[in-house]
């Protein structure tokens, strides 16, 4: 059914204006003043912002990791995402050495197809590179529309790839039109520091942070950036947590290298001291890279404001405290890394960023949606409010004050790392391709309604219906 969203203040990455939106056939059909259509349902957005749906570039739903499987799957994870104002997620598809890449992609399709309530896509992990892998990459791009490859520089003996793998992936990505993503920490040095800590009997969660120093992230970030320059390729550094890494990205960009950086909400508002909470509670705050000393937060905020970092990912990878995080009692290396964030990503950036004057409203939309869609080949189908774009729309109350809590969260894990944090603003209703997924803060979506998105090659815009407007 057609819909008209009336009286809201539309915010895009570039403009803020009051207008109505006509939604028809899953798309934004018209934007204008005083729109009317006898066949349309009218939705009053007076007093609310109308944002393009958030695009989360970094999730791990139902992912095997650390001897267990992340708790939120494509059902709970995408429902929570929708409550939080996110209408597209790009999840990391893990691969196994020696196995066809398509096997892993098929597994990820099987996990998501009947569950996702919003649109979704995949990045593909590259753990090894050889002729057999290189031969498969064109079909990954053309048939699956997967145009971003992930290389881990950490997690020795698990996911970690060597520099040759990273460099050759950068070369192939350049040749084929894909973006290389890196988890940038020096896994070899970390492995050595971890062994030394355990030998000394240092097993508490805080040693997770102390054995993964910011220098190890800065070094790996700088190395990846240099190799990108050498390959004349393109790089996206995920979950940047500290000044040392920001400096390397900034340096590379000043040299003209095509290097992008993402940070995550936890690094903006939580710090290393959380790992020292008593009764093993520090395990709730174990991420890699780890939470950093507080002074890094201002560095990250400034980097978002100045454009040195461009996007915000959730790095959603949730585990229960009871039964999963506690696998690491007595040995911090066995604590599964990650946390439940997907639902709070957008609200935290609005409340801590826009409301506190650290970034503008338009920057907020860019960081949580538009820039992500552009970088990952989804724009302008996703990431903006414009005629012809998918009607992925968030009606957002900018005034409501609330406290984040596991009690009101829709994520599956048994705790929320932001428990007790007061935030201003909340999505009230969320539409995915013109249909409500959340309406007046209630879930009204349908499992399996989310569509798999094939993405454009790096640097190409996905023109969809706007293509018709091109003057040839
Ligand atoms: N970040 C984290 O601790 N867990 C998820 C996996 C990863 O992104 O490294
Ligand atoms: Zn990572
Ligand atoms: Zn991650």
Image (cartoon, rainbow, N blue to C red):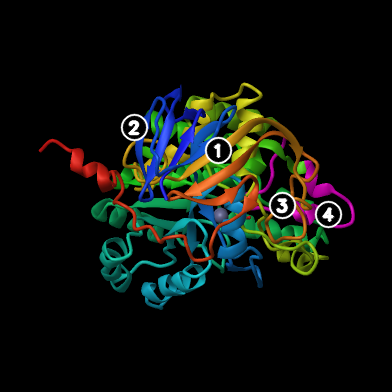
Quarter of the image where one finds residue 230: top left
Q: How far apart are marks 2 and 3 (CA)?
A: 42 Å
Residue 226 seen anywhere in this rendered image of the structure: no
The residue under label 3 is: 409
Residue 287 within the magenta-colored segment of the rendering: yes
Q: How far apart are marks 3 and 4 (CA)?
A: 19 Å
Q: Are marks 2 and 3 in contact (CB under 8 Å)?
A: no
The residue under label 2 is: 256
Tag 4's secondary structure? Answer: helix
The residue under label 1 is: 395
Q: Is residue 340 above or below residue 99?
A: above
The residue under label 4 is: 281
Circle 1 or circle 3, nearest the eye: 1
Q: In this image, 214 relative to 402: left or right?
A: left
At x 56% / y 25%, what residue is drawn?
Answer: 359
Ligand 1: give its quadrant: bottom right
């Amino acid at each position: 059914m057609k819909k008209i969203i009336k009286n809201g203040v539309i915010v895009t990455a570039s403009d803020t204006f009051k207008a109505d939106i006509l939604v028809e056939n899953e798309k934004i059909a018209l934007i204008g003043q005083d729109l009317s259509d006898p066949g349309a349902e009218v939705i009053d957005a007076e007093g609310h912002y109308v944002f393009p749906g958030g695009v989360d570039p970094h999730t791990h739903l139902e992912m095997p990791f650390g001897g267990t499987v992340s708790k939120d799957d494509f059902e709970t994870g995408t429902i929570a995402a929708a409550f939080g104002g996110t209408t597209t997620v790009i999840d990391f598809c893990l691969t196994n050495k020696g196995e066809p890449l398509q096997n892993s992609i098929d597994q990820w399709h099987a996990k998501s197809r009947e569950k996702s309530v919003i649109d979704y896509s995949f990045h593909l992990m590259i753990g090894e590179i050889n002729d057999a892998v290189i031969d498969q990459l064109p079909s990954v791009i053309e048939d699956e529309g997967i145009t971003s490859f992930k290389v881990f520089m950490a997690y020795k003996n698990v996911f970690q790839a060597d520099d040759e793998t990273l460099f050759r992936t950068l070369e192939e990505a350049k040749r084929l039109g894909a973006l290389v993503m890196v988890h940038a920490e020096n896994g070899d040095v970390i492995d050595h520091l971890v062994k030394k800590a355990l030998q000394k009997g240092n097993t508490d969660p805080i040693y997770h942070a102390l054995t993964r120093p910011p220098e190890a992230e800065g070094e790996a970030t700088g190395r990846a950036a240099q190799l990108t320059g050498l390959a004349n390729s393109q790089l996206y550094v995920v979950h940047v947590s500290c000044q040392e890494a920001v400096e390397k990205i900034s340096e590379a960009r000043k040299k003209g290298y095509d290097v992008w950086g993402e940070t995550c909400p936890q690094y903006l508002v939580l710090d290393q001291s959380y790992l020292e909470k008593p009764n093993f509670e520090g395990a709730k705050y174990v991420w890699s890279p780890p939470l950093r000393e507080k002074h890094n937060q201002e560095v990250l905020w400034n980097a978002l404001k100045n454009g040195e970092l461009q996007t915000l990912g959730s790095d959603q990878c949730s585990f229960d405290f009871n039964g999963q995080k506690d696998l690491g009692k007595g040995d911090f290396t066995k604590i599964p890394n990650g946390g439940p964030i997907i639902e709070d990503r957008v609200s935290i950036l609005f409340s801590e960023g826009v409301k506190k004057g650290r970034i503008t409203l338009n920057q907020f939309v860019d960081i949580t949606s538009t820039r992500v869609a552009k970088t990952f080949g989804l724009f302008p189908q996703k990431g903006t409010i414009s005629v012809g774009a998918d009607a992925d729309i968030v009606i957002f109350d900018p005034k409501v004050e609330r406290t984040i809590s596991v009690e009101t969260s829709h994520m599956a894990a048994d705790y929320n790392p932001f428990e007790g944090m007061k935030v201003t603003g909340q999505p009230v209703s969320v539409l995915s391709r013109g249909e409500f997924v959340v309406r007046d803060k209630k879930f009204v979506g349908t499992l399996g309604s989310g569509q798999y998105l094939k993405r454009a090659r790096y640097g190409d815009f996905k023109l969809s219906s706007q293509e018709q407007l091109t003057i040839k």
